[in-house]
Structures are given as structure tokens and as C-alpha cells.
Image (cartoon, rainbow, N blue to C red):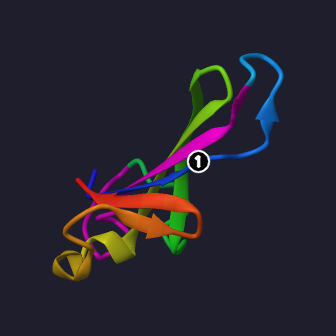
Amino acid sequence: MLYSQEYEDGTHCAANSKPRRTRVDFYCDTYAAGGQVSTVVDKGADFRVLDISEPDWCSYLFKVSTKYMCTGVAQLPKASHRVNGGAASRL
């Protein structure tokens, strides 16, 4: 994983009486960037959702691969900061 973005203070969750949370982990998709990965089904896509899970009640995790994470990594934020109501961090 190269980059993670978190969104907090979502809608109220009846299961645990807390606000919903979502984390999106971004990965480099080497096939889309010109590499050779045989498991990629849609080789022309800008991004692919690899997995969606709910590791805890009303806490969601998306794993996304994109060719845009393979270059320009130095331009990512070096520390956590707030983005669209969520915290973003480079891992």
C-alpha cells in the first residue's frame, strides 16, 4: 500500500451507536502502468476495486489499485491532514 485515506464522522450506526468510518487503501496497479500482472481482468481501467470489507461494525475498508499510484509518489503528503472531512496519510 502506498497511500491511505480515512473518512470519519459518517452517518450514525445503529449497530454500535457510533458514526460510520471508511478507509480507502490505494495500491500501485503495475499492469495498468505498463507492467505485467497476469491476474488483472480489466487492463484498460484507471482503477480497480480489489476488495471491500467491514472489519468492525460500521467500519469499512476499500482496497483500490490504480496506475496513478505507480508514479509521482513523492508528491503525496508527508504527514496526515484533513481532506474532505477525512484524514489522509501516506504509508
Is the residue 83 above or below the residue 24 in the image?
below
**To which quarter of the image does residue 66 belong?**
bottom left
In the image, residue 32 above or below residue 15: below
Q: Place residue 26 in its image quadrant.
A: bottom left
Name the image quarter holding residue 84. bottom right
At horizontal 75% and vertical 22% (from top left) the residue drawn is 17
Left/right of residue 11 with respect to residue 61 in the rendered view: right
Q: Residues within 10 Å of mark 1 (few under 14, many from 20)?
A: some
Q: Confirm whether the magenta stretch covers residue 17.
A: no
Residue occupying image coordinates x 32% and y 75%: 33
Q: Position of residue 54 (x, y in %)?
A: 61, 27
Which stretch is magenta? 18-38
Q: Residue at x 53, y 59 (%)?
A: 86
Point out residue 11 in the picture as x, y percentages from the top left corner. 79, 43
User: Residue 25 at what x, y percent from top left?
Assistant: 41, 50
- Residue that protrudes farthest toward the top in the picture: 15
Amino acid type, residue under disc 1 in the picture: Glu
Asked if residue 46 lies left or right of residue 15, the reply is left
The residue beneath circle 1 is 8
Give the vertical position of 5 relative to 34 (above or below): above
Query: In what element is the residue under mark 1?
Result: loop
In this view, the residue in front, 12 or 45, is 12
Front residue (pair 2, 38)? 2
Q: Residue furthest right?
A: 14
